Image (cartoon, grey):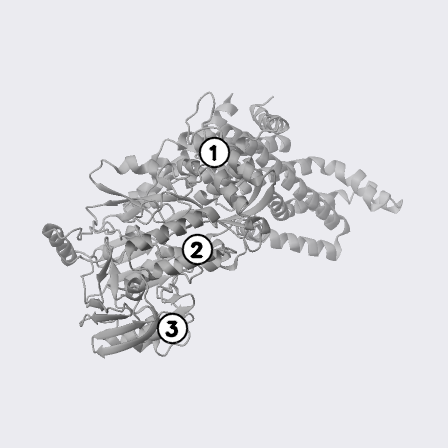
Amino acid sequence: MKSYKIYLAIIIIAFAVYTLFGGTAHQAVSGASLESPSLTHPLGTDDLGIDILAQLIHGGGYSIFLGIFSAGSATFIGSIIGIISGYIGGKIDHFLMAVCDIITGMPQMILLILLGAFLGASYLSMIIVLAMLSWPQTARTIRARVLFIKEHDYIRYSKQMGTPLYAIITRHFLPPLKPLLTLAFIKMMSRSIMMEASLAYLGLGDPTSKSWGMMLNKAMAFPGIYFTPYWKWWLTAPLIALVCLILSLMLLSKEIEV
Amino acid sequence: MSKKITLFLIISCLSILFIGCAQSADDNTANAASPENNTEVESQQTADESSENNASNALEDTPTVIRLEGSDTGLPNPFKHLTRGPGMSKMQILYDSLLEIDADGYIPWLAESYHIDETGKIFTFKLVENAKWHDGTPLTAEDVLFTFEYYKTHTPVVDNLNIDGTYIVESVVQSDTWTIDIHVSQVDNTNLSRLGGVRILPKHIWETVDDPIAYDAPDATIGSGPYYMTHYDPVKGEYRYEAFDAYWGPAPAVDAIEWLPVSDSILAFENSEISLVNVSADLLTRYEGDDAFVVRKLPSFHAYRLMMNMTDVPALEAVNVRQAMAYGIDREALVAKIARGAAEVSSMGYVPKTSKWYNPEIEAYAFDAAHAKSLLDGQTYHFRLLTGNTPSEVKLAELIKLDLEQIGITVAIESVESKTRDEAIKTGDYELLLVNSGGMGGDPDYLRSIYGNASANTAALSASTLKGYQNETVAELAIEQAHTLDENQRMTLIHEMQSLIATDVPMIMLYTNQDNFVYRASEYDGWYARFDHSKLDHNKLSYVVPTP
């Protein structure tokens, strides 16, 4: 098994085990402020005395599942719209693609900040906002593929035989689209995690969450952290974890693509 | 294998790049700051002659500029500045008052002398004769007379002249060109500070202005202070003041003062982009013991407090719930974790422990979760806690939430921009609210403003915003202490008030920060703290050469 897959598995398993056993160490004060790494706190503690490893495990799950839910929603919306647009065509296709163009043409980060401000910085609103901004790319890709598939004879025969639209989509369109959708899902997941981390780092996420971006934000907000030794464990741990996660997802999508 | 090496190299590079950002920013900004920006600022510190000579020499040689961390705090005139210290102080540099405040008390300023008659109701102020407005017009007693009339119908942001909704000035009589007699409605310990602190307005500008809040013409910041404003950008939060050469009083210490937005105040100070910084306790060792820096540790006269809306939240009307919360919050832990030890747990009677008016006999509310639980008698509650979005406020809210959960009170934290939070204090749109606020230095009459149902001298926190608190005894004591001239007798009343307030717990006083100001004496060493306000950059006297 490749190392990045092991890393992704560790994040998910660690979060699952931690959550199943009712872990609350990521939000409980369990030590003195800013303890350096020790056997009790392998990655040290933050300024509130909360264990950083526990925050990292919880934050990993937070990020991965945020990515899964937002990418899943975006993939679902994008594939529906892509198939409808490509299969039906005409004015509906023009309209849906115009919506895609509008959303794609807008500066994503600014839109994310604005929507986040209106909907609040909760976990759910973050998923909704990320999904709302991510689906057009999938829709475009899927539409292009559907335009190609629908010209096949078996699709025309199916239509002539009176096969319902739902059946055509599930039986004839989805199987060949599956690799494409998987790839889009992984890419969007990576993008969503990055965007959430960026928002949190800028201080626009849920301030009480323990996502990796918010961990970075809080560490960076500590006055003059670079002039203290605390950055070595407080800042470095979430930073490396986040970089590794994004790289792992990139490598995973590359493998699927190939 | 090669993939693993590549992966490792990419991670390492990204990490080093990220962590190294600060250092490269250092280098860039340091280069940008020198040499023309790295101006040497010299001035005064004491009456020491050599220091004064340095100041005057520097003024003659090169333009000297004090640069400070800035943000938009409103148009700096008495009607449009923001209520908090940074807004107030910028306005006070432009506008003079009859009296000023130094390290010990009130000192003559626009009024070169004053006299209080034996009834305590007539205050005679003799004005300096050479004062001018920034546009060159002479400042006379007519301006002072006009100011007191104007404030009667046009309330400034800092409203010191209204007590219990009554304007304290009955009449103002101009006895000669430079002398005025102010008649007040009743004897009050705070009359001198209230009258003396009023910012004098230029009559020739404001007499035609009906709506001062809407007025933003270029002459809306013309005052008589040692500096005049040459630049204000509300979007960037930039201000520039330049020395007023025709200033009547102590000479401006530098050629200009600038407030600039900075992303990180510590880095900005390290790069000499700003002249003064307030650092956390963790960074003190970096500057202490280094002769290049001066460290000033001062009590901040600010306190974090947990406000409770007793009007809209029935559960908070019960004193046992409020007391339980006071016992249930480990305030020592807040000091240790959030303030990193550089703070003191506040007195529940509001008066700071450093004040001579502090009553040490009142209930201390030491952390006692078991007692807190017993006070709640098995009841559980849920509250919404509104806080600002600064890291320290959010962290404070998190710790309070954790503490209160232990005694059966769950809390949902809602973090908003600080101006929104401050607005919520006025509107009452909160259940619990976390805020850091000042105004705790000097005369303890602030107890009347906050707890005694009197009008407040700051709009940030006032009795009207302590939602639902009403204690008739406290209100009566508040009035009595204001009219009691005997200090011992007044001390007894103030102590009694603190005792009652501590029992009622209308808001939970958390802790008072210590300010750790750091500056380079070689750049500028004229920073002063007032006896009632320790922020060095908020003190007008920090920007003028003191008279021997």
The answer for how far apart the CA atoms under marks 2 and 3 are is 28 Å
What x and y, as percent, mark residue A46? Answer: 45, 33
Q: Tag 3: residue type?
A: Lys
Q: Is residue A15 above or below residue B537?
A: above
Are there few (<14), some (14-19), or many (20+) residues within 10 Å of tag 1?
Answer: many
The chain holding disc 3 is: B
Q: Helix, strand or loop at disc 2?
A: helix
User: Which of these two is toward me, B128 or B543?
Assistant: B128
The chain holding disc 2 is: B
Q: Is residue B139 visible?
A: no
The answer for how far apart the CA atoms under marks 2 and 1 are is 54 Å
Marks 1 and 3: same chain? no
Q: Is residue B226 left or right of residue A154?
A: left
Residue shown at the point (50%, 40%) measured from the top left: B400
> Residue B474: which disc?
2
Q: Helix, strand or loop at disc 1?
A: helix
Q: Is residue A38 left or right of residue A155?
A: left
Q: Tag 2: residue type?
A: Val
Q: Is residue B69 left or right of residue B138?
A: right
Residue designated by label 1? A239
Q: Nearer the viewer, mark 2 or mark 1?
A: 2
Q: Nearer the viewer, mark 2 or mark 3?
A: 2
User: Which of these two is toward me, A162 or B526?
Assistant: B526
